[in-house]
Image: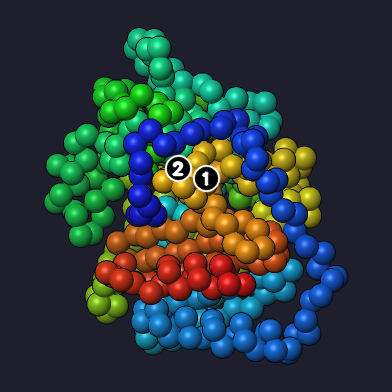
Amino acid sequence: MTGPRSPLVPGSARPLWPGEPSAGEEAPATAPDPAKGVPGARGPAERSLARRLAEAVEAADAPDVVLAVSRHGRRTVMSGGTADRRPLPREALRYEVGSAGKTFTGLLLARLIHRGVLTGGEPAAVLLGAPRPPGAHPVTLAHLITHTSGLPALPPGFLRRALPAWRTNPYARFPAEQVVRAFLSHGPRHRPGTRWCYSNFGVAVLGHALAAATGTPWERLLTDQVLDPLGLTGTTLHADGPGADAPGHTKDGRTPVPAFDAGGFQAAGAVRATPGDLLAFLEAHLDPAAAATSPTLAAALRAVLRPVLRRGLTHRHVHTIAWFRHPTDGGPMYFHSGATLGQQAFLGFRPDTGTALAAVCTRRFRAHDPFVAGAYRLLAEA
């Protein structure tokens, strides 16, 4: 359930919650008109894309690889890998997306805010039944989703409990009640809102706080508010076993690993989905009006494109409440990567070119791994 590795300059985080663009920040571009300038299905652009996708599949050197691209709603899917053929096509299997699943959590929070259920400024400890009122600077839901809560990447005591299952399923040994207890028992390391530190712990706490605030179990909440309204029937938070789920592997690409169990970290990385569902999820961000079944969901899809935080020496690293946002020559691109012990994923889209990319593979991350970097490059150069 890894996250992006980026330099952090202490004190450089500037949260802009509740999500309005900062001074001088351009508004997110809208999706281009699909009727304009779309090349023919067998044109040079499509042939070039297919060639590049095939090269990326081969370079991934994984048992199962799927790269799915949507351009103005027209999809191209390339799959392959070193494993024998599966009973189902690779593009029909569900894949673990790890930390890329945090984009679903961000969209859920945005929808609850636009429905008026929450504001984002609620202290998480209060929602989780803290025995005493929070101090002058409480950790809020906004801090948790933007990784500015001051919480560490993992909760205190995690390594000790997880060590016996470190190479199989470490998160499974830290259940929901342990995550909440660790949060309520240990204060943040830094004043909330002053520093950016990527935290699986923080987003896990957010999930439990949202469930408590709505009185709805996490899986039901995400399904009712995000998955069902977007028609994502191939997305779930638990493994259904061989035949439906793509099996993960270690770095060697041969040794299988158990299906990922997120334990109490469901909101931070439990999502598993088919490439088609992942592409539909991304396409919804490119055209909220067409994809959303309600005004609040459409508003949430637009809201998660708005910059809320900048960091780094040049403030190049821009974040929304769901996505990392980098500049390109034509406009911003939005992305998030993720990994479990046996799989990797990259999700991203570019409103300026109407392009979305979902990339998954069933092999653990290696040093200097070409998979995520190659997927990022494909999207950046789209």
Q: Position of residue 136 (x, y in %)?
A: 40, 12
Q: Tell me which residue sits at (35%, 10%) in the image.
A: 132
Using the rendered view, name the quadrant where residue 139 is placed: top left
| Distance Cα–Cα, label 1 vs label 2 | 9 Å
Q: Is residue 378 above or below residue 290?
A: below
> Relative to 46, is 336 on the left or the right?
left
Q: Tell me which residue sits at (50%, 41%) in the image.
A: 310
Q: Confirm whether residue 361 shows in the render.
A: no
Q: Which mark is residue 319?
A: 1
Q: Nearer the viewer, residue 88 or 331?
A: 331
Who comes first in sequence, dot 1 or dot 2? 2
> Relative to 106, is 180 on the left or the right?
left
Q: Which mark is residue 311?
A: 2
> Relative to 135, is 330 on the left or the right?
right
Q: Confirm whether residue 355 shows in the render.
A: yes
Q: Tell me which residue sits at (40%, 82%) in the image.
A: 59
- Say if mark 1 contacts mark 2, CB within 8 Å: yes
Q: Position of residue 223 (x, y in %)?
A: 58, 46
Q: Position of residue 196 (x, y in %)?
A: 39, 38
Q: Nearer the viewer, mark 1 or mark 2?
A: 2
Q: Callout 1: 10 Å neighbours few (<14), some, many (20+)? A: many
Residue type at mark 2?
Answer: Arg
Residue type at mark 1?
Answer: His
Q: Tell me which residue sits at (28%, 33%) in the image.
A: 178
Q: Nearer the viewer, residue 147 or 101?
A: 147
Using the rendered view, name the quadrant where residue 32 is placed: bottom right
Mark 2 secondary-structure assignment: strand
Q: Is residue 146 above or below residue 247?
A: above
Q: Position of residue 283 (x, y in %)?
A: 67, 60
The quadrant in which the N terminus is found is bottom left
Residue found at the far top of this picture: 132
